[in-house]
Image (cartoon, rainbow, N blue to C red):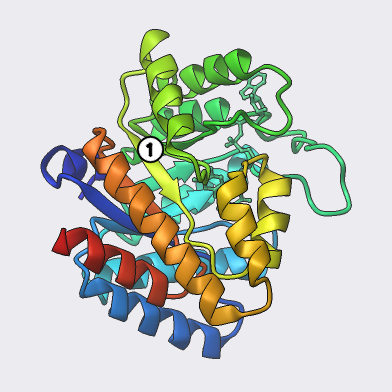
Amino acid sequence: MKISELIKTVKPSFSFEFFPPKTDDDVAQLMQTARDLRTLDPTFISVTWGAGGGTQRKTIDTVSAIKTDLRVESMAHLTCVGASSWEISAVLDELQKKGVENILALRGDPPRDHPYFVPHPDGFRHANELVAHIRQGWKFCIGVAGYPEGHVECPDKELDLRNLKQKVDAGADFVVTQLFFDNTVYFKFVERARAIGIQAPILAGIMPVTNAHQIKRFTTSCGATLPPALLSRLEAHPDDKAAVVQIGIDHAAQQCAELLRGGAPGIHFYTMNRSHSTTEILRRLRRS
Ligand SMILES: Cc1cc2nc3c(=O)[nH]c(=O)nc-3n(C[C@H](O)[C@H](O)[C@H](O)COP(=O)(O)OP(=O)(O)OC[C@H]3O[C@@H](n4cnc5c(N)ncnc54)[C@H](O)[C@@H]3O)c2cc1C
């Protein structure tokens, strides 16, 4: 089923993001995590799109297995990195044939050794072009990425928001945000988006912190801010894994409760392929 239809009726929506497994053992591990998380009744599960050919095949297979074997709605992420429009069309054909109905259309990040994104000569420069391409030839429900604190490459947050509007105007049905840790950032972003005419539902992207060192790297690379209070709690126990996980759960659970009270249509959890923190947060939310 299309996510745009699901989120009209499932309120709030809870969804989980995985990255594609690398080996066959990882596939089994990921499907077990997905099975564990299925008991939480997610609206959908999404699988990211990597730069390498091997993991792309695993994205297609995993998204398809989540839908057909686990009977949970799924979404494939798809980027423009290193791909011609013909190659992208072939992936879209295959996903459609496998019964996948939802795509998160992204430009993607440049490879690690490249400072800038360089489009394929026969490909797309920005996600809005990918959205328009998908709209022309397929019937997928389309999500796009939104950046409450602005995208790292864009010097002007208002311009970045207008670029988001281009993606929605090209045919995107909903937006999933980059991770953030301060809800004010999300609420202001939604307000600014509505003010320029973006009406699409905006799902809040939440990453429960599980590793103090890793989250500092992530936030630096994606331009998200760690609030000083959260940062100092993490810095008090940077190498105590259990304490960090607990701090991450407490913070994210509080964030989610406030987001839902404030009208967020859904929470999209960046699970890092683990089930513990997301399970605990959802249990707390449902208890309250
Ligand atoms: C929810 C979510 C899921 C993600 N999943 C993946 C994944 O699976 N795989 C992966 O590799 N990466 C993923 N990413 C990261 C994403 O690929 C990067 O953030 C990337 O740098 C930008 O992708 P985009 O689709 O937002 O690009 P775009 O929307 O194209 O934006 C990229 C930059 O260009 C600017 N821009 C946009 N449109 C235009 C235009 N028409 N003209 C001029 N400038 C423009 C924007 O302001 C921005 O600075 C994800 C991000 C999020 C938030």
Q: Is mark 1 within 8 Å of ligand 1?
A: no
Visible in this render: residue 202?
yes
The relative height of residue 284 versus residue 224 in the rendered view (above or below) is below
Q: Quadrant of residue 121?
A: top right
Is 22 on the left-hand or right-hand side of 140? right
Quadrant including the C terminus? bottom left
As drawn, 218 above or below 128: below
Position of residue 35 in the picture relative to residue 220 (left or right): left
- Residue 177 position in % (x across, y down): 47, 39
Q: Secondary structure at mark 1?
A: strand
Residue at 67% from the left image edge and 71% from the top image edge: 238
**Of 36 and 137, the residue lying toward us:** 36
Q: Which residue: 52% across, 31% down?
A: 148
Residue lying furthest bottom in this view? 25
Q: Looking at the image, in which quadrant does ligand 1 appear?
A: top right
Can you say whether 60 is above or below 181 in the image?
Answer: below
Quadrant of residue 2 within the rendered picture: top left
Residue furthest top as drawn? 196
Q: Is residue 185 above or below residue 252?
A: above
Q: Is residue 82 visible?
A: no
Instruction: Residue 18 in the image: state x and y as whole percent.
Output: 47, 65
Image coordinates of residue 159 in percent, x first then y, are: 62, 14
Report the residue marked by disc 1: 142
- Under mark 1, the amino acid is Ile
Q: Is residue 63 left or right of residue 185?
A: left
Q: Give residue 46's position: percent from left, percent from top.
A: 40, 58
For image coordinates 28% across by 36% down, the residue present is 264
| Residue at image point 75% right, 35% down | 119
